[in-house]
């Protein structure tokens, strides 16, 4: 055997492994890393005698799986503080969208921006997330809304993955809203996405999944079903913005297509939750959007728990409904606004977020064989990660076995 590359000793490990109780704590633990993966992990006293090129004592610091932000729209140009102000003066998100503002104003800015401008703006946001311990980020398109600009957004997202140590997963969200060119011709737009854009995206390997916005101000269930059938033909998994502003049967639609996740879910019914449970879809809760839209309708957290639906938490970083480039803030808000326990918040940004991206087999928990994506914290218990507001607690971030200083 070639030996280990790095050995972490004297660690308090929260493995978050699904079959461990609570945080999966290992006291006085050690983690051995080889070829970017966890080669051994357990109580230090049981560690096999094995050579390691480097050894680092953590002096009792806590480690968790690196965090995963499984729902963001962080590649965009411009900002929407004016719309934020309008909403506080009484206008609703839907009314602003219908009047041509909302998502469409970001579409205008994003179309006008060069790939390099979008890259620079995206990189700053990726770095902000990494500074809090995030090593994997999902980024959606959806502010281009034509072939050229959706491809531009996805290419920029791929470049962010190639230019940083982080893993970036990309999602085609061309069905985010109807572009002005297709006003009154929604079915034609769905055809363009399904028959022209999607095949090109699949051919060039630019997306890892396909998403859509199921809402009265966006797309109907039959329109999305048409797109999802095509996605599945191209072997792309689907996910859905579901029941955010009204119960449009989004959870049921996502379940029908075996979606990786259904996201938002404020208005989802118990029947929708049951359908998700049967399909094994993850519920991605987005408290940043709930807070910013000053929503009062709570997602059905108790029904999700009762039915055993896995719950993930994400930032939804976007300029309209969640101008929050901080996964720690999303965890904190999920505890305060939705009543998630600290353990649910942490599992929701590690294990369940990995599950929501279809990546649980190689990340999201600290277990032998998984990627060595490890966050080292200055805390006395992991529950503090959902407790302190505005307190940086990351000591170090190891990605693929290497220390990364974002
Ligand atoms: N729901 C959201 O919260 C974001 N997209 C979506 O479908 C909002 C995107 C935006 O307003 O720019
Ligand atoms: Fe979103």
Image: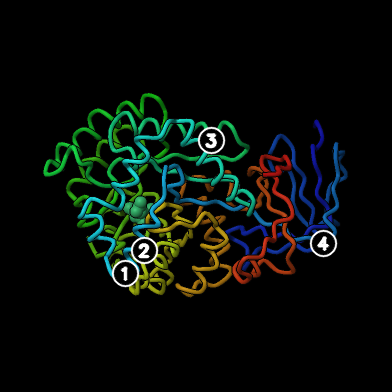
- In which quarter of the view is residue 139 placed? top left
Q: Position of residue 98 (x, y in %)?
A: 20, 55
Q: Nearer the viewer, mark 4 or mark 2?
A: 2
Q: Position of residue 316 (x, y in %)?
A: 44, 54
Compared with 276, 172 (above or below) is above
Which is more N-terminal, label 1 or label 4? 4
The residue identified by callout 1 is 89
Tell me the SS state at disc 4.
Answer: loop
Answer yes or no: disc 3 within 8 Å of ligand 2.
no
- Checking the image for residue 77, the label placed there is none
Residue 262 visible here: no
Which is more N-terminal, label 3 or label 4? 4
Q: Are marks 1 and 2 in contact (CB under 8 Å)?
A: yes
The residue identified by callout 3 is 160
- Checking the image for residue 60, the label placed there is 4
Q: 402 or 184: nearer the eye?
A: 184
Q: Nearer the viewer, mark 3 or mark 1?
A: 1
The residue identified by callout 2 is 85
Quadrant location of the C terminus? top right
- Distance from Cα at disc 3 to Cα at disc 1: 37 Å
Tell me the SS state at disc 1.
Answer: loop
- In which quarter of the view is residue 289 placed? bottom left
Which is more N-terminal, label 2 or label 3? 2
Which is more N-terminal, label 2 or label 4? 4
Compared with 403, 35 (above or below) is above
Q: Residues within 10 Å of mark 4 (few under 14, many from 20)?
A: some
- Distance from Cα at disc 4 to Cα at disc 3: 34 Å
Q: Nearer the viewer, mark 4 or mark 1?
A: 1
Quadrant location of the N terminus? top right
């Amino acid at each position: 055997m070639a030996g280990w590359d790095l050995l972490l000793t004297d660690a308090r490990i929260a493995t978050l492994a699904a079959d461990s109780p609570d945080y999966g704590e290992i006291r006085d633990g050690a983690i051995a890393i080889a070829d970017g993966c966890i080669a051994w992990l357990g109580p230090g006293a049981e560690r096999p005698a094995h050579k390691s090129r480097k050894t680092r004592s953590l002096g009792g610091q806590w480690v968790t799986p690196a965090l995963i932000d499984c729902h963001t729209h962080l590649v965009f140009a411009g900002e929407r503080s004016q719309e934020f102000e309008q909403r506080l003066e009484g206008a609703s998100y839907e009314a602003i969208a219908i009047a041509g503002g909302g998502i469409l104003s970001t579409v205008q800015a994003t179309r006008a921006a060069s790939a390099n401008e979008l890259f620079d703006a995206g990189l700053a946001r990726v770095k902000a997330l990494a500074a809090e311990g995030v090593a994997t980020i999902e980024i959606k398109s959806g502010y281009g809304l034509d072939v050229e600009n959706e491809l531009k957004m996805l290419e920029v997202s791929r470049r962010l993955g190639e230019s940083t140590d982080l893993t970036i997963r990309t999602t085609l969200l061309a069905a985010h809203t109807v572009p002005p060119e297709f006003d009154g011709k929604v079915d034609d737009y769905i055809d363009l996405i399904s028959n022209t854009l999607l095949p090109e995206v699949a051919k060039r390997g630019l997306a890892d999944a396909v998403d859509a916005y199921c809402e009265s101000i966006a797309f109907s269930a039959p329109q999305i079903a048409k797109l999802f059938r095509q996605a599945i033909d191209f072997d792309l998994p689907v996910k859905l913005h579901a029941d955010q502003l009204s119960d449009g049967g989004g959870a049921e639609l996502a379940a029908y297509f075996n979606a990786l996740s259904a996201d938002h879910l404020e208005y989802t019914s118990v029947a929708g939750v049951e359908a998700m449970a049967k399909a094994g879809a993850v519920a991605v809760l987005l408290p940043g959007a709930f807070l910013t839209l000053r929503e009062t309708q709570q997602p059905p957290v108790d029904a999700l728990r009762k039915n055993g639906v896995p719950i993930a938490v994400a930032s939804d970083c976007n300029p309209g409904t969640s101008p929050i480039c901080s996964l720690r803030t999303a965890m904190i808000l999920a505890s305060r606004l939705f009543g998630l326990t600290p353990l649910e918040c942490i599992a929701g940004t590690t294990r369940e977020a990995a599950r929501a991206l279809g990546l649980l087999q190689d990340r999201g928990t600290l277990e032998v064989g998984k990627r060595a994506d490890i966050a080292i914290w200055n805390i006395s218990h992991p529950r503090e990660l959902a407790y302190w507001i505005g307190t940086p607690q990351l000591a170090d971030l190891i990605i693929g076995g290497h220390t990364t200083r974002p």
